[in-house]
Image: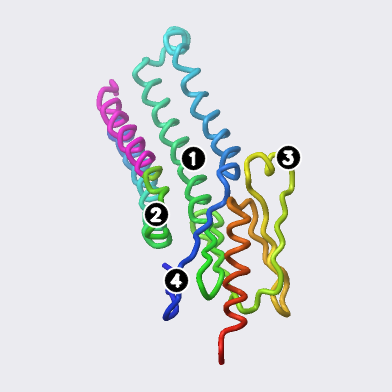
Amino acid sequence: MGFIVALVIYILFLAVYWAVVLSILWHVKQYSMPQDSYKWILWIFLVTIAVLNIISLALFFSLKL
Amino acid sequence: MIHLLPNEQILMVLHRHWIAIFWRFLIGAVLLIFALLAIPYFPFLESVLGIPQIALWFFALIYLMAAVLVIFVFWIDYYLDIWIITSERIIDIDQKGLFNREISEFMLERVQDVTIEIPNIMATFLKYGNIIIQTAGEQSFKIEQAPNVYGAKNLILDYAKKQNVRPL
């Protein structure tokens, strides 16, 4: 039971988190200039976020609930 | 996206100088360092509070994810603040948070006077400043904390002059 509640809260957190990330990406796609040279910084953020997500998933399923 | 007029060319795209994002990034760095400073205390917290270390790592990671997202939002607010100088007009795109955006523009033929302002010692050394553009019959237009102010000013004046001598 405890695991199910924790899983639901965690999934809700991830859903909100990725909704914000995707809305940022949508803004970049819509409004950034094609010749912009700063796009590599966005990739750094995206890779960092993806790595932290994967580690958090691994840790969540290692928790003894 | 910006829709260009026929024969219109983009001459220069200006973002704010990096100093505009520096202080916000510093706040973000402090948020990240808090999490790293807490890590050595995890065994102590486990023995005192009885929370397993793996759970503490998990919460630290969630905190880090939130901190990275906050810095990402700071960045996007900076990144989408743009001034576009084209051969016909100046477009000012002001990103205010994530879903609030203000776009204003005026034609170069209305430019009457361009002033450069280097406001302080930091601006002098880091080579940024404000560009104040006076337009015909309207209030002045200010580009704040812009890099390459002299290049932008010359470009605006050159193209404004070309617009004003264009044959009818």
Q: Pointers 2 and 1 in contact (CB under 8 A)?
A: no
Task: Tell whether B51 sits left or right of B99.
Answer: left
> At 38% from the left edge and 48% from the top edge, which residue is drawn?
A39
Kindly report which numbered mark, 2 or 4, lies closer to the viewer in this rendering.
4
Q: Residues within 10 Å of mark 1 (few under 14, many from 20)?
A: many
Task: Tell whether B9 sits left or right of B112.
Answer: left
> At 71% from the left edge and 50% from the top edge, which residue is drawn?
B118
Kindly report which numbered mark, 3 or 1, lies closer to the viewer in this rendering.
3
User: Which quadrant is the N terminus of chain B positioned in?
Assistant: bottom left
What is the C-alpha distance between the residues marked 4 and 3?
A: 35 Å
B32 in relation to A22, above or below = above
Identify the secondary structure beneath mark 3: helix
Q: Read off the residue under disc 2.
A: A23
Kindly report which numbered mark, 3 or 2, lies closer to the viewer in this rendering.
3
Q: Earlier in the sequence, mark 4 or mark 3?
A: 4
Q: Read off the residue under disc 4.
A: B9
* Residue range (magenta): A43-65
Q: Read off the residue under disc 3.
A: B121
Q: Quadrant of residue A62?
A: top left
In this rendered view, identify the residue nearer to me: B85 or B35: B85
Q: Read off the residue under disc 1.
A: B71
**What amino acid type should be assigned to the residue bearing mark 3?**
Ile
B124 in relation to B92, above or below = above
On the same chain, marks 2 and 4? The answer is no
Identify the secondary structure beneath mark 1: helix
Q: Residues within 10 Å of mark 2 (few under 14, many from 20)?
A: few
